[in-house]
Image: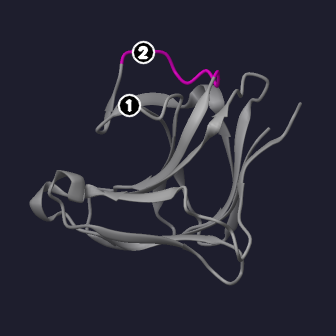
Amino acid sequence: MNDVVIFDFVSNSNISNWQVINDGVMGGKSKSQFYCNDEGQGVFEGKISLENNGGFCSVRYTCNPVSLTKNKFFIIRLKGDNKQYQFRVKSDKNNSHSYVFPFQTSGEWQTITIPIQEMYPAFRGQKLAIPNYDGANLEEIAFLIGNKETESFKLLIKSIKVQ
């Protein structure tokens, strides 16, 4: 199997292809930021607000198209804050839907293993009646937090690979 590195953070990583998308696109008041710290980690942090029907923050990375048909898992090295997040992918960056896998953070460094074929299609929080992700093409990855409560969050990301 060929390991594919989607993103590996170092202290001077070029994060220009990472973009924060918060609920402000729908009138919400949540705020977040994404930056690379001196320890060589991507830092996604902010505060979720439920005002104006808000409730989510996300950061996404657009990559050159890559086929993952020979791969079985996303392998993500990260440290969260005991909160649940979603890892999301798009086979076409212009699709309205994403393929989603929720995961729980422990407050410690952990390696999250996500079976590619278990990522389910969803749009605005609703599961769709189409097949799960097949890995044929990858153009975008994202992390999203939206636990239906007002809360601060911080997620440190070291690497995203496919195995």
In the image, residue 129 lies at what x, y percent?
A: 37, 16
Label 1: state its secondary structure. loop
Residue at point 31% right, 57% down? Answer: 56
Residue at horizontal 64 percent and vertical 39 percent from the top: 64
- Callout 2, which amino acid? Ile
Q: Position of residue 94 (x, y in %)?
A: 41, 32
Q: Identify the residue position indicated by label 2 in the image.
A: 130
Give the Cα distance between marks 2 and 1. Answer: 10 Å
Q: Is residue 70 above or below residue 79?
A: above
Outermost residue toward the bottom in this view: 38
Mark identifier at residue 97? 1
Residue drawn 89% across the image and 30% down it? 1
Looking at the image, residue 4 lies above or below residue 52: above
The mark lying in front, picked from 2 and 1, is: 1
Kind of residue sitting beneath label 1: His
Q: Image check: 30 left or right of 76?
A: left
Q: Residue furthest left?
A: 52
* First in sequence: mark 2 vs mark 1: 1
Which SS does the magenta portion mostly show?
loop
In this rendering, the answer to whether 39 lies above or below 129 is below
Report the magenta residues as a range: 129-136
Question: Which of the colour schemes (rainbow, by chain, secondary structure, one colour) is used?
Answer: one colour
Q: Position of residue 29 (x, y in %)?
A: 20, 67
Q: Is residue 3 above or below residue 52?
A: above
Q: Which mark is residue 39?
A: none
- Determine whether label 2 and label 1 are within 8 Å by CB: yes
Using a 10 Å C-alpha cutoff, classify the residue at mark 1 as few (fewer than 14 neighbours), some (14 to 19) or many (20 or more). many
Judged left or right of residue 19, residue 30 is left
Where residue 117 sits: x, y (%)? 62, 25
The reply, left or right, for residue 67 in relation to residue 19 is right
